[in-house]
Amino acid sequence: MTADPLATRTAESTSYREITDSRGRVHRVGESDRHRNEPLALGFAFLSGFGGGAFHPLFAALVPEYLGENNNASNYGMV
């Protein structure tokens, strides 16, 4: 079992703060957490962008389906 490299640092040399919650669990908050979550944030940004891009062609097809073929452009602009 390997030792935690962050546990050997002194409080003066770290770029994070240790916060204890009401249950006694210790959380490290600071500069290192931002970089650890970057791939997760980029993944969710990709998924939301992909979903938004997939919704617009579907939305254009649903407007005449629900509001009728007459005045399709004005209905799409209104919605």
Image (cartoon, helix red, strand yellow):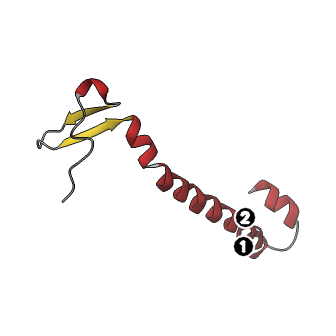
Q: Give residue 24's position: percent from left, percent from top.
A: 11, 41
Which residue is nearer to you in this view: 7 or 55? Answer: 7
If you read the primary sequence from the N terminus, does the residue marked by circle 2 or circle 1 appear first? 2
Type of amino acid under label 1? Tyr
Q: Residue furthest left?
A: 24
Q: Which residue is mark 1?
A: 66
Say whether residue 69 is left or right of residue 36. Answer: right
Q: Give residue 62's position: percent from left, percent from top.
A: 72, 72
What residue sits 11% from the left and 44% below the top?
23
Q: How many marks?
A: 2
65 vs 50: above or below: below
Q: Quadrant of residue 27?
A: top left
Q: Quadrant of the C terminus?
A: bottom right
Q: Quadrant of residue 59?
A: bottom right
Q: Quadrant of the N terminus?
A: bottom left
What residue sits 21% from the left and 40% below the top?
7
Type of amino acid under label 2? His
Say whether residue 36 is left or right of residue 13. Answer: right
Q: Which residue is mark 2?
A: 56
Q: Quadrant of residue 45?
A: bottom right
18 vs 72: above or below: above
| Other-residue count near label 2 (Cα within 10 Å), few / some / many at <14 / 14–19 / ≥20 | few
Q: Secondary structure at mark 1?
A: helix
Q: Secondary structure at mark 2?
A: helix
